[in-house]
Amino acid sequence: MRRTTIAALLAPALLLLMGRVQALADEVPWRRHTIDDTSRGADGVRLADINGDGLQDITTGWEEGGVIRVYLHPGHQQAHKKWPAVTVGKVRSPEDAVFVDLDADGATDVVSSCEGQTQTMFVHWAPQSENQLLEESAWTTQPIPATKKQSHWMFCVPAQVDGRHGIDLIVGSKGKQAMIGWLQAPQDPRQLDQWRLHNICDVGWIMSLKMADIDGDGDNDILASDRRGPQQGCIWLENPEVNGPLQEPWTKHSVGSQNREVMFLDYADVDGDGLRDAVVPDTSGDILLHRRLPGRKPGWKASNIPFPLNTGSSKSTAIGDINRDGRADIVFSCENSKGVSGIVWLEQTGRAGERRWHQHEISGPSGIKFDLIQLYDIDSDGDEDVLTCEERENLGVVWYENPTK
């Protein structure tokens, strides 16, 4: 009798679940476009307009291929084809590449971060002439000595930290001697042996770094997701206000997800209250929404977003209005997605206090290991497309065309 009762209670839920799985199977994946698939192990995409045409260009490191490449947006009509590309440097085990005009000469350079046996960061100096951007020989690669064999470098964010000289670099790493640190720019940024590395705090494995004025005091703080180690979770580091970052420590604050193996986070207003929230997946099978609470002192309230069905394991999240209904949605990418979906999006529905998330397909079963997601209207049709990399089936640098009309 008891078994019959339990079965009867579970039947509606099972039918609902089966209905959701069937609905997902019936959805058509977004159209995929290849930007580049000619090397191996594309590992993350970062954006900037480097030639002043108003369109976002791309840089990425190919981890197994050992190259750093730049892709110039070819214009909206040509964006569905492969993009003009240049190899700006050859380094081993690149994990990240980011645009920054490091020497303030008007030409946008690239800084790469390498792990493996390399454990060094590099500057790929851009040619001053825009006409030479696609000439490999016009780019020059040099290591940053202060980073050599110091750590497994994973991520870098350009930021002005000390108010002196040129732009500085916030850096994150993993493994032994892992840190969130900052590279202090000298008077002449071209003198790479004069850059100084300062440890802000010890970590385990940095996945994300974002600069934002979290406490509203007028300077940029650091938001990070630390995947492993004794203090794993999402944290923010308070920029010293009085005597500056060389004289005072950055105060560490918890955002949430402590003791969880968190992956790539995103930071934007999810619930429409004007305050920016943090969304991050973890490897245990949760997507965590850290809702920013009102008040002068930063505080956060965590809740779970239902983990998507028929997908791989967690990798990245990105917040944006995918269906243009005025509400924030979440795009989610996966590792270990062989035979299932590697990228989906979660539509936000329901009223305040009754928020629901409805799952939709993006990639379908093609691709196994996706990476950091960027949302950008690549074809200028008014909706946000999804830009990312895939490393195992060698889909390479790809974007998915949003079908919203």
Image (tube, helix red, strand yellow):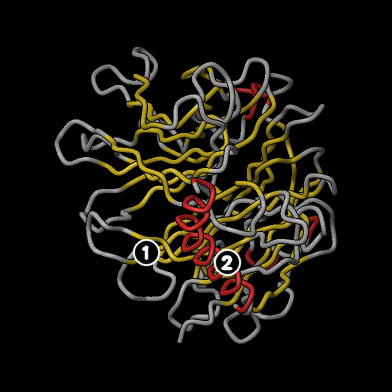
Residue 57 in percent (x, y) is at 59, 64
Residue closer to the observer: 222 or 308: 308
User: Who's the residue at 49% across and 38% down the image?
Assistant: 209
Tag shown at residue 18: 2
Amino acid type assigned to the residue bearing label 1 in the image? Gln
Instruction: Kindly report the distance in space between the C-alpha atoms of the residues bearing marks 1 and 2.
Output: 21 Å
Quarter of the view holding residue 120? top right
Residue 92 in percent (x, y) is at 82, 38
Residue 19 in percent (x, y) is at 54, 71
Amino acid type assigned to the residue bearing label 2 in the image? Met
Dot 1 surroundings within 10 Å: few (below 14), some, or many (20 or more)? many
Quick check: can you spot residue 348? yes
Q: What element carries label 1?
A: strand
Q: In this view, does 88 lie above or below 230?
A: below
User: Who's the residue at 73% across and 57% down the image?
Assistant: 390
Residue positioned most to the top = 247
Tag shown at residue 348: 1
Quarter of the view holding residue 70? bottom right
Residue closer to the observer: 310 or 281: 310
